[in-house]
Amino acid sequence: MYSLLITSFIRTRIFLLSLALLLTLGIISILIGKQYLVKQEKTIVAAKQFQKESINRNVEYHGDDLGLLLYYLRFTLIKQPTNISAISIGQSDVNPLLQTVTIRGLQGQKYDSDFENPSLLMSGNLDLGFVIIYLFPLVLIAMTFNLYSEEKEQGTWRILAAQTNAKISFLLKKLSVRILFILFVLVVLLLLAAAYLLIPMNTYFWALFMQGILYLLFWSALCLLIISFRKKSSFNALSLISIWVVLTILLPATVNNYVINRYQVPEALHAMIEQRDGYHEKWDLEKDVAMSGFLKEYPQFKDLSVPEDEFSWLWYYAMQHNGDMESYKTGLDMKKKILMRNKVSERIALFVPTMHAQLSFNKLAGTDMIGHMNFLDALTDFHANLRLGFYPKIFDNAPADVIDWQKHQAKYFEQKRDFSWNLLLLPTLLITLLTASIGLLNLRKL
């Protein structure tokens, strides 16, 4: 029976069209992922070269004044790219791969990002994750919506019913052939992506692999459920396409709109303004005002004196530090709201397989918002360590040559991508089993 069903399916136009469409778009998405990785690598190489050249050039011109030299010098922290991110680019197209900062106020530099074409950001990237989440279900719908209705509309269902009592078994076998075809193409594309993009076969890859399989099984169960109502082909097609629109476009957009309005984040601009005001207003105040806040954070410099009638780098960098302190609480509030946005989205996604798959892909690829927030936390520590390393030498009026500039190359941040297998797989698995069970119960009425 299976060999006959497979042969019959392979001879259909929908098979050839589906195979050509999925393989073509899948391969294109893998190539786009490769371009993304190449762009990342070029950006990293350019940033490392720029830092090296910038240090050499500025040391040549400002080597006798370390405070002035470090006013200009920028130091780079790079988020260690992972090849698996090419499968699900996620939010890394808007969140920067690297950050360059001076030892001046951090808040004004922390949320800098590259300019991007807004039309490209609106359409998003055609990565493999997009193909799996949006296009694979459409192809599955096109292949399965008329499994029963076509037989009935063409009059072959009565002939089949007269020849066998295993009508349900016939439909399930016919459906399984199409599901296995979809899963086969998915496996081929994921393995091809792993080979071409040099993705290590580690836990993250196999977790993404399993999530992709479960996601398509969910859509298979949904198709089975609609077929089980034994309606006309037009009804099945309209129902499945409507469900696809709701699950892939309408619900995610609604949830996104809700969390954006529920947890508004104006603090990014406020933090930058507060940082600038906290620094600039100190020019018009007594120097002791700026120094008091600075010495609470850095008591090791309390024995240093600040001249009242002339400029000093100790006073200047104390004002910069005060600007960061003024905006610290606002920055913390913004971080809490962003994390709350992500938390609420993840909770709702437990009941929406399309959202859950997208968030899971991004998390496993390290391109989610949590990964970016961890990077910003690392940038804060990186900036603090730079200050601690340079302040003593600046305040001692040391020349630039006392510092080994070869040690100040671009640094890497390697994030930890923790995840729970239960939270990753169970939500989609349970919804799939529930949907398939209802569909099978309906089919028993045949």
Image: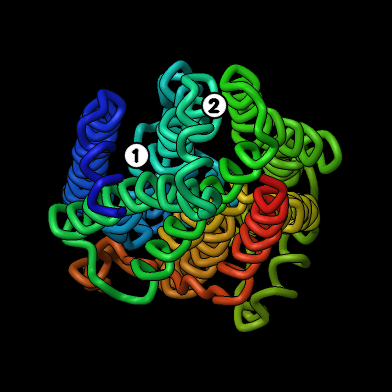
Q: Position of residue 298 (x, y in %)?
A: 64, 76
Q: Position of residue 426 (x, y in %)?
A: 62, 70
Q: Quadrant of the C terminus?
A: top right
Observer-nearest of 46 and 151: 151
**Dot 2 alpha-carbon crowd within 10 angstroms: few under 14, some 14 to 19, many 20 or more:** some
Q: CA distance from mark 1 to mark 2?
A: 39 Å
> Which quadrant of the structure image shows residue 412?
bottom left
Q: Position of residue 268 (x, y in %)?
A: 69, 40
Q: Is residue 413 visible?
A: yes
**Residue found 72% across the figure and 44% down from its top:** 271
Task: Find disc 2 in the rendering and name its residue.
Answer: 152
- Which of discs 1 and 2 lies nearer the camera? The answer is 2
Say above or below: 255 vs 361: above
Task: Find disc 1 in the rendering and name its residue.
Answer: 127
The residue at the far left in this view is 196
Observer-nearest of 256 and 145: 145
Q: Is residue 331 left or right of residue 151?
A: right
Q: Is residue 279 visible?
A: no
Q: Is residue 72 left or right of residue 391?
A: left
Say above or below: 288 vs 277: below
> Which quadrant of the structure image shows residue 200?
bottom left
The circle drawn on residue 71 is none
Instruction: Label 2: state its secondary structure.
Output: helix
* Residue type marked 1: Asp
Instruction: Label 1: state its secondary structure.
Output: loop
How many numbered tags mark residues here?
2
Q: Position of residue 355 (x, y in %)?
A: 62, 46
**Residue found 80% across the figure and 46% down from its top:** 285
**Residue found 46% across the figure and 22% down from its top:** 123
